[in-house]
Amino acid sequence: MPTATPQRTWAAIRAEFARLPGLSAAAAALLVAASAAGLVAPWALGRLVDDVIAEAGSGRVAYWATVIAVAALAGGALTTAATANAARLGETMLAHLRERVLDRALHLPSATLERTGTGDLVSRTGEDATAVASALTASGPLIVNAALSVVLTAGGLFALDWRLGLAGLAAAPGYLFALRWYLPRSAPYYVKKRVVSGERTQALAGALRGAATARAYRIEETHVAHVAASSATTRDLTLEVFQNYTRFVSRINRAELIGLAAVLIAGFLLVREQMATVGAATAAALYFHRLFNPIGILLLESDTALQAGASLARLVGVADLPAAPVADPADPAVTGGDLDVVVAQHHYDDGPVVLADITLRLAAGSRVALVGASGAGKSTLAAIAAGIVAPADGTVRLGGTPLDELGETRTRQRIALISQEVHVFAGPLRDDLRLARPDASDGELLAALDLIGATGWFQALPGGLDTHVGDGGHRLTAAQAQQLALARLVLADPEVAVLDEATAEAGSSSARDLERAADAATAGRTTLIVAHRLTQAASADQVLVLDHGRVIEEGAPDDLLRAGGRYSELWAAWNR
């Protein structure tokens, strides 16, 4: 997945502010007013000190005390209003960004998801979105308010006496040195931390999805070790970040000591030489001390800002992905349901060749089965035939039209892939079925379920089509979930169906039922089957036997049996 450049990330932030001009202006005005209100108390205290030294009456003391109290109340009210308004602005901006990211994520090309996996995407929409939300609604207003306080307080310090203002600048080199030391060391860590976090999420998701298989093959410890290793990498990186952070804090404290000492010494010398009043020196010290918190916030929250910046760049990277192209009515029409797959060779990224010298032709309405040992390349060839994966060197044509010219949307309308891993969406069964065809009537939904032999378990549901299925609802068995996927296939009514071990979950009594359901759902369609059970291959018009990414046998099932080759050996082993 791409990550946006710093320039593009800032441009995205500016665009969000420009989209909400009224809310942005209100937030800025309230933050400035709140910061300005905080300047009143130190100045009033300085004037109070001078009046006390001058032995002014109790009325002046009461006056300045009233000014300080009113300023404190006004500052509190303005700060509350500013924080609430800024949080509203941040949440609105984040909601819009999340909508864009989700829209792009849901419209990503299948090949992109196949290549990148879901861990990175889950990490971006989960952890990265949370980091940005925290920055926009909590740290963001805090940082902006702190920056305004620094600017206004520094202005107030120079307004009291420019010499006291210059003394306060003695802390600046210390602050700059701390930032110069910290930023180059920390920024790469946060980018790397987001990456390893995505890898950890991918490892966890993979282990959870394959939990049943892992238990069956007794490889739980291998998965646990993989998750533990990715978690350890994340932990070690987090500790390194924290070590840098604590060293950064110590440098900030050193700069504060230097600055306050310089202001106090300068104030003492100016008062001794009668070049400034005690009240002015007192106010200057209070002003500089007032800078501790905002400067500390700016420097310390830079840690949060860096994390949020890295996360925001990852979100903007997804949000900036090109939108799914709209199908052009002038696109070449598909004539017939013939599917031609030619793969000179295929490899993933810079990996080894996994398919080579493949020529596969599925005549309209025919059934072709792919057979071979695990790792032979069957699923990869099925994904290429379905248009999920583009061959590194080759072409796929439907009705004579290349799939890349047909486009993702039209390809999905004409070619449906059902794999071993199907998903039951949470909600009414009716909505789950209508994912395939939103305008389907209840009668058409029931007809699809009846066609694939799901009437028995469907009639046992408490609410019929209104029954909530999936997470938090009625749990369907693995075989029932597969039947639901086949019912969606019937409703979608594509020209071509690709079944990648779509009946593999039925390893016992429901195996025959699922095979009959698959036969009914694909009747009359051009069908490519990755045969988990050789009984599926036996009913095909043609069988391709793959071995290490190459076709070693091809022909009708009966002919291959008589030939006594690899298919015959597999058949004999299956029927033992």
Image (cartoon, helix red, strand yellow):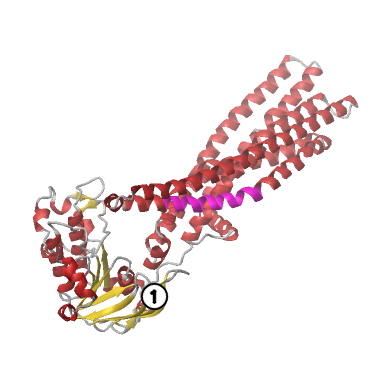
Up-down relation of residue 560 to residue 476 (above or below): below
Which residue, given by chain and number where applicable, does mark 1 sit on? 391
Decide which of 562, 354 is in the foreground and name it.
562
Instruction: Give residue 466's position: percent from left, percent from top.
Output: 17, 51
In which quarter of the view is residue 498 placed? bottom left
Decide which of 562, 220 is in the foreground and name it.
562
201 lies left or right of 81: left
Decide which of 207, 33 is in the foreground and name it.
207
User: Main SS type for the magenta part?
Assistant: helix
In which quarter of the view is residue 384 placed? bottom left
Instruction: Give residue 505's position: percent from left, percent from top.
Output: 21, 58
Instruction: Give residue 116's position: percent from left, percent from top.
Output: 43, 62
Three-letter code for the amino acid on which mark 1 is drawn: Pro
Up-down relation of residue 555 to residue 58 (above or below): below
Residue at the image position 57 percent from the left and 31 percent from the top: 76
Residue at the image position 26 percent from the left and 79 percent from the top: 553
> Secondary structure beneath disc 1?
loop
In which quarter of the view is residue 13 placed? bottom right
Residue at the image position 91 percent from the left and 27 percent from the top: 273
**Dot 1, how many residues are within 10 Å of its Cα: few (below 14), some (14-19), or many (20+)?**
many
Magenta highlight on residue 2: no
Instruction: Give residue 448's position: percent from left, percent from top.
Output: 14, 64
How many numbered circles does the render carry?
1
496 lies left or right of 241: left
Residue at the image position 21 percent from the left and 50 percent from the top: 469
Segment colored magenta: 183-201
The reply to whether residue 451 is in sight is: yes
Up-down relation of residue 235 to residue 319 (above or below): above
The reply to whether residue 521 is in sight is: no
Up-down relation of residue 400 to residue 16 (above or below): below
Q: Is the C terminus in the top left, top right, bottom left or bottom right quadrant? A: bottom left
